[in-house]
Amino acid sequence: MFRKYLMLALIVGLFFAIGCSDDDNNPVDPKKTDEFALVEAAGTAYFSTYVTTSGASPNITTGALFTLLQDGDATNDPVIVDYRAAADYASGHIRGAINITLATLVDKLNDNTIPKTKKIVNVCYTGQNSSYATAFMNLLGYDAQSLMFGMCGVSTTAGVNKTDLWINQIAADEFASQLTATVSTPSTVVPFPTLSTGKKSAEEIMKARFPLGISSWSITAADVFANPSNYFIINYWPNAEYLNPGHIPGAFCFEPKVSLGKDQMLKYLPTDKTIVIYCYTGQTSAQLACYLQMLGYNAKSLMFGQNGFAYNTLTKSKYTVPTTDYSAIIVK
């Protein structure tokens, strides 16, 4: 009998020894950084106000930029960053603009080519890429704006490459007849993504994650309307406009400035489905796509927004061809 109890004691002791060994190899770290929470806090702070660190709109019109550059006071001139291809930049760009790519943006922030102490104006062809970059900078605490409609809002002269992109996009209302006023309401709460860059601050985490989405952050209206059920679609408008002029079938209304907190609509975003965000012009949705990608979602901005597929249904935020002569700030 004694030998039986001795054997049982040895087995129990061995069990606990193995268990303790496993615990030692996989300790619970109470100091582990909640990366998602850090990025979400930065995003909620920015998108709940949607202003830069100086209190300005994250978008700037060509007229406002023209005034700054032509007022004879160089001290208030922003740092202008142009994301177009080198050949297109060479065909004509805004005076003083530096030419980089989205892929090199983090490097240019780190080496202070783009200083945190200056106002930044991001420029591209249509305002889509520059909006993506603007969100990233503002989330990091820079004072950044995107030039509305890009170089298409500065000039439509044939002398500057690809300034007809907006004109060509709004030529037809391809999907206007498919808009609906039927309300869709998300109801399934989904666990938030887990981020694991190993970084300790929101800035470090976002810089580590930024290259992940820059090659696939946008989507066309044709792709979305071909099968809307393939996507979790966010209509980023006030509810009244979600109902009139209507929205893409199945789209959910996320109210600007009040919907992206983790206790609000963020908890409904799926981690196993592509999220498509659209707004009026594609410029705000590009900012949201950047932020949601930082959080670990597969998010895309619908290029050109509703301007691009149902232009004549809109009563505001419509692209118009520039009629003012801004050529004084364009150089080669």
Image (cartoon, helix red, strand yellow):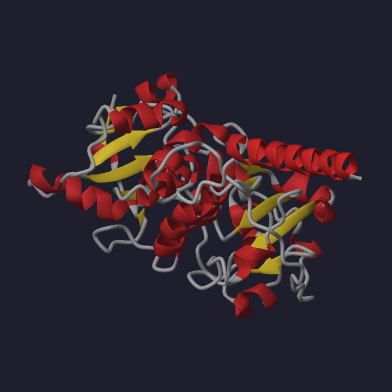
Residue 255 location in percent, x, y?
Answer: 57, 72
Q: Which of 83 and 324 is in front in this view?
A: 83
Residue 27 location in percent, x, y?
Answer: 57, 42
Q: Which of 52 and 219 is in front in this view?
A: 52
In the displayed structure image, the side of residue 176 where residue 301 appears, left or right? left
Residue 308 location in percent, x, y?
Answer: 63, 52
Residue 320 visible? The answer is no
Q: Nearer the viewer, residue 112 or 39?
A: 39
Residue at (22% x, 37% y) in the render = 115
Q: Which of 108 and 12 is in front in this view?
A: 12
Q: Residue furthest bottom?
A: 240
Residue 233 location in percent, x, y?
Answer: 71, 58
Residue 161 visible? The answer is yes
Q: Which residue lies furthest to the top in this view?
A: 87
Where's the C terminus, which quadrant? top left
Residue at (82% x, 50% y) in the render = 230
In the displayed structure image, the side of residue 180 where residue 329 appears, left or right? left
Residue at (65% x, 67% y) in the render = 313
State the count of labels. Answer: 0
Residue at (55% x, 39% y) in the render = 196
Where's the N terminus, which quadrant? top right
For residue 20, what is the image quadrant? top right
Residue 97, placed above or below residue 184: above
Q: Residue furthest front?
A: 2
Residue 145, placed above or below residue 264: above
